[in-house]
Amino acid sequence: MSLKSHLQRFIPERKHIQEHKHLRHFGDWLHDPGIWHLTRHSSAGGVAIGVFWAMMPLPLQTIFAAATAIFMRVNLPLSVIFVWVTNPVTAAPIYYLAYKLGSVLLNEPIENVAFEFSIHWMTVTLVHIWQPLMAGCLLLGVCGAAISNMVVRVLWRILSLRKWNQRRSGRGKGN
């Protein structure tokens, strides 16, 4: 089974994305066939964009991922799906790691910070740690995007070669 067929099982239908309340504002751009193809290039790019935006502690990450995928003409559904790398379960540990990485990167002391999503936390704590947090998020986003892009390309290549070898060996047996 190819990577393409594996991915197609998880990708939402084109109609659902085109009718999504936030994404439908992209209008005619959603009709570009380039953002719907599952090729090695478009799939790897879509996953990388999703992972990059997943690391950014911003609201509406899906909109940013979709806009980037449309602009870069890579797979839109994969970019939207992979934004969910950060979710209510994974967000706090990922952002805490990002904060620690950013603190080391900027040579700032690491404070004991409890992440929570509230107005009080954002006005009191976030104003003091935003620079190391964003530096760490950018580092995780760029590294995560690069690694995920390479992983998808390598998996695609391996599975394509395996499928090609199976077809070739099947021809040799009189099929």
Image (cartoon, rainbow, N blue to C red):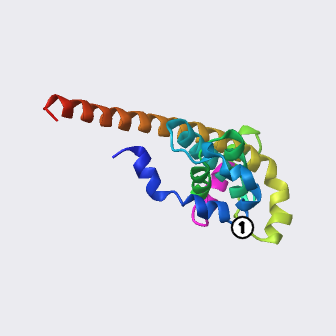
Instruction: Classify residue 162 by image quadrant.
Output: top left
Give the answer, above or below, for where 149 lies relative to 64: above
Instruction: Classify residue 159 by image quadrant.
Output: top left
In the displayed structure image, the side of residue 123 where residue 144 appears, left or right: left
Q: Residue at x 54, y 43 (%)?
A: 43
Query: Of 65 and 25, which appears nearest the observer?
Result: 25
Give the answer, above or below, for where 111 lies relative to 32: below
Query: Of 54 and 105, which appears nearest the observer?
Result: 54
Q: Can residue 109 be spotted in the picture?
A: no
- Which amino acid lies under the numbered mark 1 shown in the image of this protein? Lys
Query: Of 148 and 77, which appears nearest the observer?
Result: 77
Give the answer, above or below, for where 12 lies relative to 36: below
Rendered location of residue 56, percent (x, y)? 71, 51
- Magenta extent: 86-98
Instruction: Classify residue 146 by image quadrant.
Output: top right
Give the answer, above or below, for where 85 lies relative to 32: below
Q: Residue at x 56, y 51 (%)?
A: 78
In the displayed structure image, the side of residue 114 where residue 159 appears, left or right: left
Tell me the SS state at disc 1: loop
For this orientation, the residue located farthest to the left is 173
Query: Can you say which quadrant of the picture contains the C terminus?
Result: top left
Q: Can residue 146 be spotted in the picture?
A: yes
Residue 94 magenta = yes
Rendered location of residue 157, percent (x, y)? 41, 33
Rendered location of residue 160, percent (x, y)? 37, 35
Residue 64 magenta = no
In the picture of the structure, the residue carrying the numbered disc 1 is 21
Magenta span dominant secondary structure = helix
Local crowd size for mark 1, using a 10 Å CA cut-off: few (<14), some (14–19), many (≥20): few
Q: Residue at x 27, y 31 (%)?
A: 165
Query: Of 98 and 63, which appears nearest the observer?
Result: 63
